[in-house]
Image (spheres, helix red, strand yellow):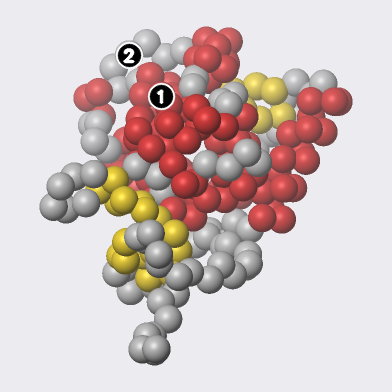
């Protein structure tokens, strides 16, 4: 029997560059994609995923527990978003979050936690089959869906750069409100696009509460 070198990577999907159909395969650390075909021998290893932002299974589970705690304690949630970003609906839906009404100052770490809770809340609105369809339709990544919402959050944060970039941009701007970061934050919009009437907390609450996962991911 011919001995072949083992390939190590992460299960992923892509659009075939030749015919355009979606195919499942393995992406190695150096970015090479190997299609999985019937008869291919694979070995599945169990390990803990970690994103560039150091978001692990345990951390997301903690966020999920916090959401459950707030639900049982009936803690009042209010929407949060800097005033200047309230002048465009796309930016409101993209960056707006819910926070505890007792929160006074939002720093970058608190924003990250609240954003992940928002993502998990949107995921939990969907059924598992519908979640697969949404992730396939927008990112061609149905394999990221899981019946466990915390697992799905981890998969999305690990593989979808647009989500990580959104968190990091706002976190950077909270820490350092420079013109350069702000322009990256609102791109591809410009300051001239921030011309809508600002919304109050009640209106922002309703917009965020009605937001669906599909609409949110399309905005990204």
Q: Which mark is residue 54?
A: none
Which residue lies at the image location 72% right of the left edge and 48% below the top edge? 61
Which residue lies at the image location 25% right of the left edge and 23% below the top edge? 193
State left or right for residue 26 relative to residue 155.
Answer: left
Give above or below for 163 relative to 186.
Answer: below
Residue denoted by label 2: 196
**Marks 2 and 1, how far apart in space?**
20 Å
Give above or below for 139 relative to 86.
Answer: below
Residue denoted by label 1: 215
Nearest to the observer: residue 151 or residue 41? 41
Coordinates of residue 171 in the picture (x, y in percent): 49, 47
Coordinates of residue 167 in the picture (x, y in percent): 48, 45
| Mark 1 burial class by Cα count in 10 Å: few <14, some 14-19, many 20+ | few
| Mark 2 burial class by Cα count in 10 Å: few <14, some 14-19, many 20+ | few
From this viewpoint, which residue is outermost toward the left?
A: 18
From this viewpoint, which residue is outermost toward the right?
A: 73
Secondary structure found at label 1: helix
Secondary structure found at label 2: loop
Coordinates of residue 13 in the picture (x, y in percent): 36, 52
Q: Earlier in the sequence, mark 2 or mark 1?
A: 2
State left or right for residue 178 relative to residue 117.
Answer: left
Which residue lies at the image location 44% right of the left edge and 59% below the top edge? 11
Nearest to the observer: residue 163 or residue 91? 163
Q: Tell which tag, 2 or 1, sits nearer the viewer.
A: 1
Coordinates of residue 219 in the picture (x, y in percent): 35, 30
């Amino acid at each position: 029997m011919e001995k072949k070198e083992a390939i190590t990577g992460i299960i992923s999907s892509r659009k075939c560059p030749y015919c355009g159909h979606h195919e499942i395969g393995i992406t190695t650390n150096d970015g090479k994609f190997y299609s999985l075909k019937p008869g291919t021998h694979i070995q599945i290893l169990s390990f803990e995923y970690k994103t560039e932002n150091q978001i692990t299974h345990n951390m997301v589970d903690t966020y999920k527990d916090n959401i459950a705690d707030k639900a049982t304690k009936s803690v009042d949630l209010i929407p949060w978003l800097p005033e200047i970003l309230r002048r465009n609906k796309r930016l409101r839906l993209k960056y707006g979050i819910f926070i505890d009404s007792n929160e006074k100052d939002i720093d970058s770490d608190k924003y990250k936690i609240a954003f992940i809770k928002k993502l998990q809340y949107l995921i939990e609105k969907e059924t598992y089959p519908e979640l697969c369809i949404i992730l396939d339709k927008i990112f061609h990544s149905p394999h990221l869906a899981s019946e466990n919402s915390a697992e799905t959050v981890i998969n999305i944060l690990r593989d979808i750069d647009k989500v990580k970039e959104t968190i990091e941009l706002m976190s950077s701007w909270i820490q350092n409100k420079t013109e350069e970061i702000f322009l990256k934050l609102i791109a591809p919009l410009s300051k001239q696009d921030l011309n809508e009437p600002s919304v109050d907390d009640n209106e922002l609450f309703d917009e965020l509460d009605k937001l669906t996962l599909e609409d949110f991911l399309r905005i990204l």
